Every structure is written in C-alpha cells, then in structure tokens.
Amino acid sequence: MKELFRTTDPTLIPFATAILRAENIECFDLDVHMSILEGSIGVMPRRLMVADRDYFIARSILRENDVEVSEKP
C-alpha cells in the first residue's frame, strides 16, 4: 500500500474516498482512531492509502479534482 496524502481536514478523506471509489479504486483510511489518543482535537493527521497497482492512477484522479497528493511515490 502507498500513501496518497495525509491531512487533519476531516472532510478531505471522505471526499477523496468518494472520488476514488467512483472510479473503482479501493482506498483505505489509516489512523482513523487516533482521536482516542489525542482527545478529539484533530491534530493527528489521517492517511489515505491505495494498493501499489492503483497508486499512479489514483494520484492523477485526485489531482484532476484539486486534491493535493503527496509528492513522494
């Protein structure tokens, strides 16, 4: 699995997930339950991951929809 991006914005992960799933690309949200450790203040970033085989097409799709993705492949 490769990381597409990480964010503290609670709306960005569901938005990106909906875009990718509409294109039949499965993605996985990591660090969802970190709010237990941080006290629900939203300082711990969440990560959106995809399978290695879908990484480059997922990056392209998110960029087309103005979602900033990580620069490291």
Image (cartoon, rainbow, N blue to C red):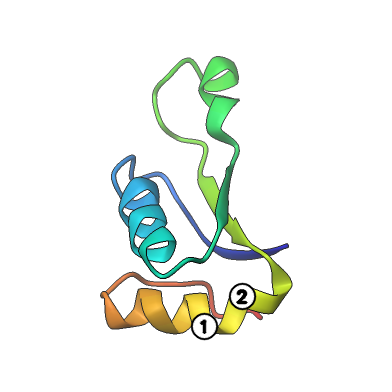
Considering only vertical position in the picture, is 65 above or below 41?
Answer: below
| Residue drawn at 50 percent across, 75 percent down | 58
Q: Say which amino acid is labelled 1.
A: Ile
Is label 1 in contact with label 2 (beta carbons under 8 Å)?
yes
Tag 2 residue = 54
Give x and y (percent) for residue 37.
60, 18
Q: CA distance from mark 1 to mark 2?
A: 6 Å
The picture quadrant where one finds residue 54 is bottom right
Left or right of 12 in this view: 55: right
Residue drawn at 37 percent across, 72 percent down: 68
Left or right of 18 in this view: 30: right
- Estimate how packed mark 2 is, as few (under 14), some (14 to 19) or many (20 or more) residues with alpha carbons within 10 Å: some
Question: Within the image, what quadrant is residue 27 found in?
Answer: bottom right
Depth check: 34 or 53 in front?
53
Q: Amino acid at mark 2?
A: Asp
Q: Residues within 10 Å of mark 1 (few under 14, many from 20)?
A: few
Q: How many marks?
A: 2
The quarter in which the C terminus is drawn is: bottom right
Q: Secondary structure under badge 2? A: helix
Please state which of residues 10 and 37 is positioned toward the viewer in this rendering: 10
Quadrant of image for the N terminus: bottom right
The residue that label 1 is drawn on is 57
> Is the residue 48 above or below the residue 25 in the image?
above
Residue 2, placed above or below residue 41? below
Left or right: 20, with 64 as reference point: right
* SS under mark 1: helix
